[in-house]
Image (cartoon, rainbow, N blue to C red):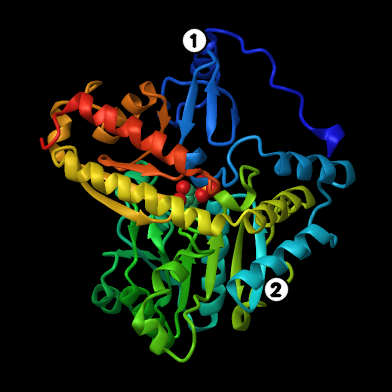
Amino acid sequence: MKEIVPPPPPPIVRNQFETIRELFTKNVVPSYGRFDLALSHGQGSYVFDVNGRRYLDLGGGIAVCALGHAHPAITEALVEQSRKLIHCSNLYYQEPQGRLAQALVNLIGPGKVFFSNSGAEANEGLFKLARKFGHDEGRFEILTAINSFHGRTLAGISATGQDKVKKGFEPMVQGFRHVPYNDLEAMRNAISPATVAILVEGIQGEGGVTPATPEYLLGLRQLCNGKKLLLMMDSVQCGHFRSGRFQSYQRILENSELATKNDEPFLPDAVSMAKSLGGGFPMGAFWVRAPFADLLSAGTHGTTYGGSPLACAVALKVLEVIERDKLEANAREVGEHLKAGLLALKQRYPKAVREVRGLGLMLGLELAPELTNVLPGDPAKSMATRLTSLLQAGGLLVIPAGTQIIRLLPALNLRRHEAEEGLGIIEATLRSLAQPGS
Ligand SMILES: Cc1ncc(COP(=O)(O)O)c(C=O)c1O
């Protein structure tokens, strides 16, 4: 390890922001609405911009940087594996992929794993799995939830229950219908003879940090059993210990009396993963329950890069550190502390904060409509975007969701004092906009 410790970051080049933005304006497809911030390097839960200013990162690269930035164990795994074998294709066997698949099966349940390169691709695998499952009976339709988000591929936006991602790209891939989330009756009524699967997030992320209820999850399982449908869960954002358990459904159901009455523990038929799985190294995966694990037989699905030795070595290391440093418990404890702090802010600033939602280190702050009149910035921009910019000015990175929700998706090793620092910046920002009680 000693000889591979990365050298200190290069000296910070001052005032490079405009130059970098110019490079983007001229050369990068403008499909993202970016903030006026160019980042240079990070350390733990802090990142630094090109002018050397430090920010507390409670966005975690949108729920990706599970161990924070520049974690030495990730560097070590990258360097060690890259000295051996970075890539070899899926024409051959290699140990890291086999070991990672085993680790994920041990964490979820009996089944098998397919590796992809992103969350959208992991979901594409689920769509194909469902189509294969129903093919011989002519069933192909997948029901998803309104306000869901399932990725930006053509099938991903077709599956996503939000019109804004579809606009301009019609016609959609056929075979997806959306029904209200957490509404079992609506789901039951939507099932048609063509339906083959249900896909939901355990906690809706992009849709505004809304956890599923225990009744909903258990009801969906029963519905799928009764109608011979696959129950598929998109855990790209809410999975990988973010909720305080490996899977958000485990956390949601852990104290449910209904769940303990059941003979068999709740298990979906398939789970997609990405984001924190690689801790920043791009990768995705899906797990499929044992009875369906061989549906995608040789030649039916694949990707050149998926599950490369390098990606899997990093993901194994991320899992090892999460276990070694007890980050599952940390996500729960620090998450609860953070949530309590946010709830206190809701009490103190009821005209700024309407609701606080989420589990573990996946938290959402729904802004009150009144805030729109006092928030500085371009009124054409959403409240969430304008508050995010203001928090950035105060030294804090968060992620907007929709027009009025701020998401906190920090590293799983976030410390209590860092959570408090973040709460302090949020409070100071809200205080600058409104008086307590207003
Ligand atoms: C729930 C969910 N599914 C799928 C995706 C798509 O993942 P990716 O951006 O890695 O393709 C995301 C990304 O935000 C997500 O939150």
Residue pointed to by mark 1 = 18
- Indicate the position of residue 299 as horizontal and vertical percent values: 73, 67
Occupied quadrant, residue 421: top left
Tell me whether circle 2 and circle 1 mark residues in contact (CB < 8 Å): no
Residue drawn where x is 46% and y is 44% of the image: 416
Say which element carries label 1. helix
Q: Nearer the viewer, residue 372 or 2?
A: 2
Q: Quadrant of the C terminus?
A: top left
Q: CA distance from mark 2 to mark 1?
A: 51 Å
Q: Is residue 157 visible?
A: no
Indicate the quadrant where residue 359 lies: bottom left
**Number of other residues with Cα within 10 Å of mark 2, as a class: few under 14, some 14 to 19, many 20 or more:** few
Query: Where is mark 2, residue-wise?
Result: 297
Looking at the rendered structure, the kind of residue marked 1 is: Glu
Mark whose residue sits in front, 2 or 1 = 1
Residue 427 in the image: state x and y as whole percent.
Answer: 28, 33
Residue appearing at x 13%, y 38% in the figure: 351
For badge 2, the amino acid type reads Ser
